[in-house]
Image: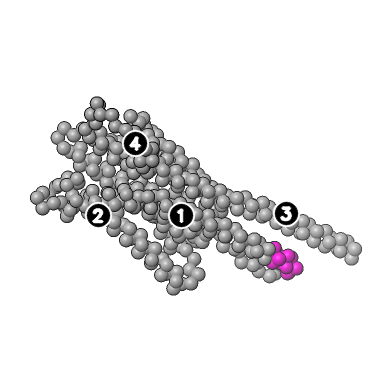
Amino acid sequence: MPVRCCEDEIRIILALTWASFIPQIKHVWKTKDSRGISTAYLLFNVLCITEHVFFQSLDTAYLWDISKLPSAPVSVSLLDWANLAQELGDWVLSNVFFLLCLYYSPPIRPHRHRLRILLILAFYSFFLLFTLVPLILDLTTDVFCPPRHPHDCLLPERDVVPFLRGIHCYFLLPITTVILPVLGFYKQAQRQRRQRQQGQPRRQHHQEAREQATMIPPSHPPSPTTPTDLNRLLARSRLFQAAIFALSAILWIFRLPPGKQERAYEPPPPTDDHLPPQPWLLVFLHWWIFMGYMTVDEAIFAVGQGVVGYLGLRKAIAAEGRSEGEEEAERRLLLVAAEERSTYGSES
């Protein structure tokens, strides 16, 4: 049986995972600008964490419902509540970051921009109709109870519960937790590479403007500053979040989900039956669907955040090196100008 995490480790991992979202939310809130962040990257990660909340909430509610039966072999433990709390906290913070980035996205073409935002929100709302909305109705009302037992029926007696779980397990889970997050990180990395390539001619233009500015009298106002590069600001916080989620992915191996506990009271197979070994691919898929998806998904998120954080950090380091060189060059120009003025004054 897997080793269960102690209470202190649970509190630490909860605090770290939630804290890893705060710097990113803070930077978007302060800059009031989300240019450079891919919408696909935002949307696909929110869909993935919504799927996690659906499974964790359903498994915990299922386990809680069965634990109320007389002589129930299982009960909801502290670890089960911690798993649910972590996913709910990540979902809330991911939605805050998602909505802030949509609200502060720069409108290049106002009409197309508003239509694009509305389509994204409509797609996300449509996804919620097949995940959290029916689950909330299941947990708070008796609308899905069968006619023979219309009130206070158990979750296994409601036809919509196994139906939704089957659709999510075998159809939506591979798409929303593997394919879409990988595609979102690819789109974000592509956006950052394109932004870096566009920065090359922009830097040459600023260099020419700076050379021309040395010939302008000091009374002229300075030229407007360029917009903030949010990916450079988020680089270190993304790398920190990648390290935290990599640690969390490893710990999920030892944090037994509620879905695994439900199989504790299934009748064991007869000892005299010698079943042939199953193919490793089927064993892996069974493990991934019922308990390993959290480990795989958080590992994908950690690798993706690490890649986009590394790309942003490279750009930040290059920009810091350029700014230091430009300041040194401007300092030399000022010293030369001061020498010329002092020489001219002494000669006159």
Mark-to-mark CA distance, 4 and 3: 67 Å
Placement of 144 over or under 216, stated as above or below: above
| Residues drawn in magenta | 206-217
Q: Is residue 327 magenta?
A: no
Callout 2, which amino acid?
Pro
Per the image, the residue denoted by label 4 is 278
Q: Residues within 10 Å of mark 1 (few under 14, many from 20)?
A: some
Q: Position of residue 279 (x, y in %)?
A: 37, 38
Using residue 156 as the reference point, say whether residue 119 is left or right of it.
right
Mark 1, mark 2: which one is toward the viewer?
1
Residue that protrudes farthest toward the bottom in the picture = 111
Picture disc at residue 183:
1
**Near-viewer residue (69 or 175):** 175
Residue ID at (44%, 71%): 112
Using residue 184 as the reference point, say whether residue 1 is left or right of it.
left
Per the image, the residue denoted by label 3 is 328
Mark 2, mark 3: which one is toward the viewer?
2
Callout 3, which amino acid?
Glu
Mark-to-mark CA distance, 3 and 1: 42 Å
Q: Quadrant of the N terminus?
A: top left
Mark-to-mark CA distance, 2 and 4: 35 Å
Per the image, the residue denoted by label 2 is 134
**Near-viewer residue (58 or 211):** 58
Kindly state the secondary structure of the residue where label 4 is placed.
Answer: loop
Callout 1, which amino acid?
Leu
**Near-viewer residue (330 or 286):** 286
Residue ID at (56%, 52%): 312
Placement of 156 over or under 47, stated as above or below: above
Callout 4, which amino acid?
Gln
Do the numbered discs 4 and 3 sit on residues whose CB atoms are within 8 Å? no
